[in-house]
Amino acid sequence: MKRFILFPFLVFTLSFHLLSQQLPLFTQYRENATIINPGAMESDFLVNQQNFTIGSSFRSQWTGLEGAPRTRILRGSFVSNGYGGAQLLAGASILSDRTGPTSLTGIYGRIGAVISNDPEYFGISLGLSGGLVQFKYNATEAVLHEDGDVVGESTYAQLFPDIGFGVYAYQTVGDGNTLYGGISVPQLLGLDLKFTEENGEFDIKRIQHFYANIGLIKYFSDGDGFVEPSLWVKYAPNVPINTDFNLRVQLPGSLWIGTGISTAKNFHLDVGFNLGDNVGFDNLIKLGYGYDYSFSDFGPFVGSTHELNLTYSFSN
């Protein structure tokens, strides 16, 4: 079997994005928690008791490199109203993630239950996600080392199922503050795809990723605004554990600002605003922008990352 050494850029992007970090990355984890953990509660529910949420995200990663990752997500979630027993947790999402000659497009649904007698104040939720994902590889966009020839003349595509599981808990503490956390495995099924080309064979593997997070929503003394420290831990076999430390401050009124740093040597800033009862709306519209900068000395300079999130939430 003949193996290939790809052009250095592709070696870096493919090995890091598909082998080390095969799931989409986020700057604003808070807005995409349900993508990572099928059992997670939307932040709009924890803060504003809005039980319907529709959101979209666009992320442009490593803007200094050609063929860098581009991620698009459309998501929706719902928590049933009512008290006593278990409340229904449901949602759906569409994901598109492309890096160089490779792309993933998937559609997912999630379902679960919130076990609580009073879900506005505390609960333990368990969620299961399932979906169908198409993996595509365009061999004409992958070049060989040294001579610059492309790997092949074809585009390969395969469909495969994807399943995820998550557990999440939240509790009102002190004067209305909220402590939350969870653990999840967003892709329980591994994957080993083999493609045969006229010049030989190549394969791409997906492995399980494990996530854990904990955070606290601490309100100001007047109840108008809050500060939210949070911690995200990510682990994949044969890859160093990555930890993200985040801090977001919701200022009185509409504006929020945040910052964070990770053990992978990424620094980020995010800023956004809410349009809700502060401007006379019964529902809530949120727009957020995130910026990442990598100061890692591993591999080539990858440039900055930009992320946009738009969310609309409401309650019945």
Image (spheres, rainbow, N blue to C red):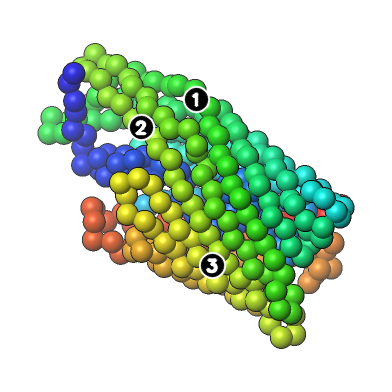
Q: Which residue is mark 1?
A: 160
Q: Label 2, label 1: how many angstroms apart (C-alpha)? A: 12 Å
Residue wearing tag 2: 205
Q: CA distance from mark 2 to mark 3?
A: 31 Å
Mark 3 surroundings: few (<14), some (14-19) or many (≥20) residues within 10 A = many
At a point 70% along the width and 74% down the height, the residue shown is 173
Q: Nearer the viewer, residue 122 or 284?
A: 122
Residue at the spot of label 3: 230
Q: Secondary structure at mark 2?
A: strand
**Which of the 4 image quadrants contains residue 273?**
bottom right
Apparent side of residue 115 relative to residue 214 in the rendered image (left or right): right
**Residue 288, position as x, y percentages in the image:** 59, 61
State the residue at coordinates (40%, 64%): 262
Marks 1/3: CA–CA distance: 33 Å
Q: Quadrant of residue 282?
A: bottom right
User: For the residue marked with disc 2, what is the amino acid?
Assistant: Lys
For marks 2 and 3, the one nearer the N-term is 2
Q: Position of residue 299 (x, y in %)?
A: 23, 53
Q: Is residue 34 left or right of residue 85?
A: left
Q: Position of residue 244 (x, y in %)?
A: 44, 63
Q: Residues within 10 Å of mark 2 (few under 14, many from 20)?
A: few
Residue 253 visible, this angle: no
Left or right: residue 305 compared with residue 229: left
Mark 3 belongs to which amino acid? Answer: Ser
